[in-house]
Image: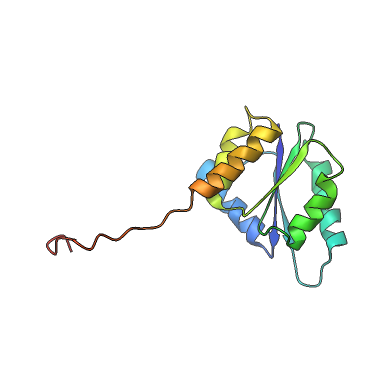
């Protein structure tokens, strides 16, 4: 199974994983890494590497991070650039995580990366207000 590592600034990674598990139930082979004030890239690389060793990463690792170019992304990049079966997607959101968790049993790392990218984009919706609302409905 492909392991999933969610890496974000502060405790967002832990909390969004809790939200996903609230919907999908407890998940195996998934971990969260936090980047806290005062920490550096080296600390994040160490946290990622420790988690990779704890998870079953034989089929690959998908890093899901908050910001492209942010420290969690940069630290994951250092690791992913050294391994062919590791990918990174930035802009993590709850619908993206849910789609990835639901697809990883039957997807390759490359397919899972596309699932993450597409579901992240498709989950952004805007409420279109209809000006001609019947006042009786309100």
- In percent of width and height, residue 52 lies at 81, 44
Nearer-the-camera pick, 102 or 19:
102
Against 16, residue 96 (above or below) is above
Q: Quadrant of the N terminus?
A: top right
- In percent of width and height, residue 20 lies at 56, 48
Against 42, residue 2 (above or below) is above
Residue lying at 40% horizontally and 57% vertically, measured from the top left: 126
Q: Residue 103: which quarter of the image?
A: top right
Left or right of 94? Residue 67 is right
Furthest residue to the top?
A: 106
Residue 22 visible here: no
Residue lying at 84% horizontally and 55% vertically, measured from the top left: 45
Residue lying at 81% horizontally and 56% vertically, measured from the top left: 75
Against 13, residue 99 (above or below) is above
Furthest residue to the front?
A: 131
Left or right of 51? Residue 106 is left
Nearer-the-camera pick, 103 or 78:
78
- In percent of width and height, residue 101 lies at 60, 39
Scheme by which the image is coloured: rainbow
Q: Quadrant of the C terminus?
A: bottom left
Against 129, residue 25 (above or below) is above
Furthest residue to the left?
A: 136
Furthest residue to the bottom?
A: 38
Residue 90 visible here: yes
Residue lying at 61% horizontally and 58% vertically, measured from the top left: 15
Numbered circles on residues, count: 0
- In percent of width and height, residue 63 lies at 72, 47
Left or right of 13? Residue 75 is right
């Amino acid at each position: 199974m492909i392991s999933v590592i969610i890496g974000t600034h502060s405790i967002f990674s832990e909390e969004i994983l809790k939200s996903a598990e609230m919907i999908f139930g407890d998940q195996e082979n998934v971990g969260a890494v936090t980047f806290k004030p005062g920490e550096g890239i080296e600390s994040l690389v160490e946290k990622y590497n420790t988690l990779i060793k704890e998870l079953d990463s034989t089929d690959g690792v998908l890093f899901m991070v908050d910001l492209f170019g942010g420290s969690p992304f940069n630290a994951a990049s250092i690791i992913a650039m050294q391994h062919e079966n590791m990918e990174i997607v930035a802009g993590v959101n709850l619908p993206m995580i849910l789609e990835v968790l639901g697809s990883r049993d039957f997807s390759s790392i490359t397919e899972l990366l596309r699932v993450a990218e597409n579901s992240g984009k498709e989950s952004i919706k805007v409420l279109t207000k209809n000006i001609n609302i019947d006042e009786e409905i309100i």
